Amino acid sequence: MAQQGCSEFLDRIDERHPNQPEYVQAVREVVADVWELVEQDARYRRARVLERLTEPDRSVSFRVSWEDDSGGAHVARGYRVQTCNALGPYKGGLRFHPSVNESILKFLGFEQTFKNSLTGLPIGAGKGGADFDPRKRSDAEVRRFCQAFMIELLRDIGPETDVPAGDIGVGDREIGYLFGQYKRSSGNFAGALTGKPLAFGGSELRSEATGFGVVYFTAAVLERAGETLDGKRCAVSGAGNVATYCARKLLEEGGTVVSLSDSGGTLAVEDGLSNDHLDWLGTRGRRLHDLAEEFGLAYREDSKPWSLECDLAFPCATQNELDAADARGLVDGGCGWIVEGANMPCDPEAHEIFAESKAVLCPGKAANAGGVAVSALEMSQNASFQRWTRKRVDKLLRGVMGRIHHACADQFEDADRPDYVRAANRAGFIRVAEALVAQGIG
Ligand code: NDP
């Protein structure tokens, strides 16, 4: 009966969100794990908690017209999905990438709801972006795009309503341009964006927070299993913000990082990457094949890192980057832990393979919550006109990641076979569901 109710609910999700496969995938994954909680609690059913969480509060799209360096006009589509503000102001990144559409932003906003809830901090959830590709544009073009984008976004955001941050394609540079336009147009120097450079309201460690947080969470998972990172071989995908800071922290903790990757292929380093390699790469601009050439390393075009021998895998690039064949390769190769640095990087078939194996899958909504947690700390610093030290922020970040791990562990149904995916979904759901019930229908 419960099973039937769940599948009817999911059929309705399919019907209500046609042509939005990423969104439906994200909802399916969570609903299967929390359905029982809703069945058991009449308050959740009366308040239609699941129906409300699966319908974003508001979703806007807007035209962004901008000019290239030769005076040519371009039109992009911008979005902001305000998913749920039951726990605090809408909070979630902006993504600039040609693949951006409403389905991807709705899925990211939905994931963000449970992630932000897990942090225990007062932040709601949202996500936004545009189908614009900053990688192919000059600095002046990126600036003009960011200014045009912010002129449209401005009316929907503010330090107490909605506070965007970065994501794929939106780093320090873009946040700087976006903030400059926000300030000019609104006349307010207010914390309406996080991920700002340190010089004007940014927080220490925000750039590093997601990647570092992934490693802090991993350390807690390993500790529970009586293990440490020391000497472990770690395959990392991606070469952007999350991947590079994850790699840096893994090195610090004694791990051997055997790969990075990008949309062109994989940098495979049998003996492990060094800090010199990461310094050279920086967080933006330099490409992996250039790094390979500079240091005489192997760059395998059109390949992923998942066939490399490793103890831990860290998918840190993008959604659905790790499929069934990759999962099978990892499991057969003896990989024991898969820790998602990216949002939803493992597809549903990969999930099934991990669930049937001994490998432990740590979902992004728990493992990569460090970025949004430090964004929330940036909001606190902005609101109180303070700037905290790196040491203090790092301590708070470690504390948040430890508490997320505890919140998951509290939900384990079988302590010998910890299911972090189900546990994170349930722990994240309970806090937001309680808030929705307490705030009444609306
Ligand atoms: P960046 O733009 O800094 O880096 C993304 C990296 O992933 C690039 O190396 C890019 O390569 C690679 N990549 C993108 N698409 C593909 C693809 N289809 N196949 C292979 N590689 C690909 O983004 P972030 O590091 O900020 O974000 C990475 C992931 O982490 C995303 O899922 C994001 O939502 C998530 N995340 C980010 C947070 C943050 O604080 N930044 C917070 C929480 C989650 P190329 O340059 O060749 O495209």
Image: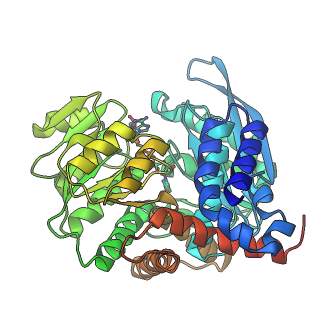
Q: Which quadrant would the N terminus be assigned to in this image?
A: bottom right
In the rendered image of this protein, does residue 398 appear above or below residue 300? below
Q: Which quadrant would the C terminus be assigned to in this image?
A: bottom right
In the rendered image of this protein, does residue 358 appear above or below residue 106? below
Which one is nearer the viewer's eye here, 211 or 389?
211
In the rendered image of this protein, does residue 426 appear above or below residue 192? below
Q: Position of residue 406 (x, y in %)?
A: 47, 80
Residue 405 vs residue 54: left or right? Answer: left
Q: Residue at x 18, y 68 (%)?
A: 254
Q: Residue at x 57, y 43 (%)?
A: 95
Residue 35 vs residue 439: left or right? Answer: left
Q: Position of residue 112 (x, y in %)?
A: 61, 58
Residue 215 vs residue 250: left or right? Answer: right
The picture quadrant where one finds residue 46 is: bottom right
The picture quadrant where one finds residue 42 is: bottom right
Can you see residue 179? no
Q: Position of residue 297 (x, y in %)?
A: 13, 38
Which one is nearer the viewer's eye here, 236 or 148?
236
The picture quadrant where one finds residue 292 is: top left
Q: Position of residue 182 (x, y in %)?
A: 71, 52
Can you see residue 95? yes
Instruction: Give ligand 1's quarter of the image.
Output: top left
The mark total stands at 0
